[in-house]
Image (cartoon, rainbow, N blue to C red):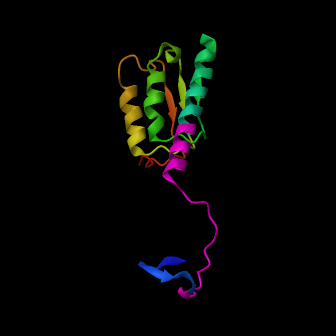
Amino acid sequence: DTAAVSGVVGVPAKAAPAVAKPHVASTPPTTVAAATATAADSAERLRSALSAFCARADGERLALSLKARGLTDAEVPTLIECLHSRACAATTSLDLGANALSDAGAFQLIDALRAPGCAPQLRAVQLGANRATPAS
């Protein structure tokens, strides 16, 4: 039986020095796969919420609330696509508070809202409690 000890191959396993391992608090490891799964879940939750919103009758699509849904900048293009659709033509308010939108996501959304045909009736957008820098 041989094992690699300190990068040296061929040292007998029984000859390996006993080294006390430091105590490390047990926290779940963050992996790329977990982050990707979380992003995919967030995008799917957004699509589901937008689908439910679009399925409402015309008069019931005035206020779109996506508050505290864990949205990040990655979901902004999906939101913009919805805001350009006929389903959002009468939407007057959009609540994106308590998410994880940064300055980049907020500016991307603002630029899209300036485009002709993007939620033309929208009068109020809530962005409080995000990662974006507060206006001064």
The magenta region covers: 15-41
Instruction: Give the tally of numbered discs.
Output: 0
* Above or below for 114 versus 130: above
Place of residue 70 in the rendered image (x, y in percent of width and height, measured from the top left): 57, 42
* Above or below for 136 versus 46: below
Residue at point 53% right, 38% down? 40
- The quarter in which the N terminus is drawn is bottom right
Q: In the depicted view, which residue is nearer to us: 23 or 11? A: 11
Place of residue 91 in the rendered image (x, y in percent of width and height, measured from the top left): 53, 20
Q: In the depicted view, which residue is nearer to us: 36 or 78? A: 36
- Res 29 quadrant in image: bottom right
Q: Please give left or right for residue 40 compared with residue 106 in the image.
A: right
124 magenta-colored:
no
* Above or below for 20 versus 43: below
19 magenta-colored:
yes
Residue at point 44% right, 23% down? 81
Residue at point 47% right, 29% down? 78
Place of residue 98 in the rendered image (x, y in percent of width and height, measured from the top left): 57, 44
Q: In the depicted view, which residue is nearer to us: 98 or 11? A: 11
Place of residue 106 in the rendered image (x, y in percent of width and height, measured from the top left): 42, 39
Residue at point 36% right, 18% down? 116
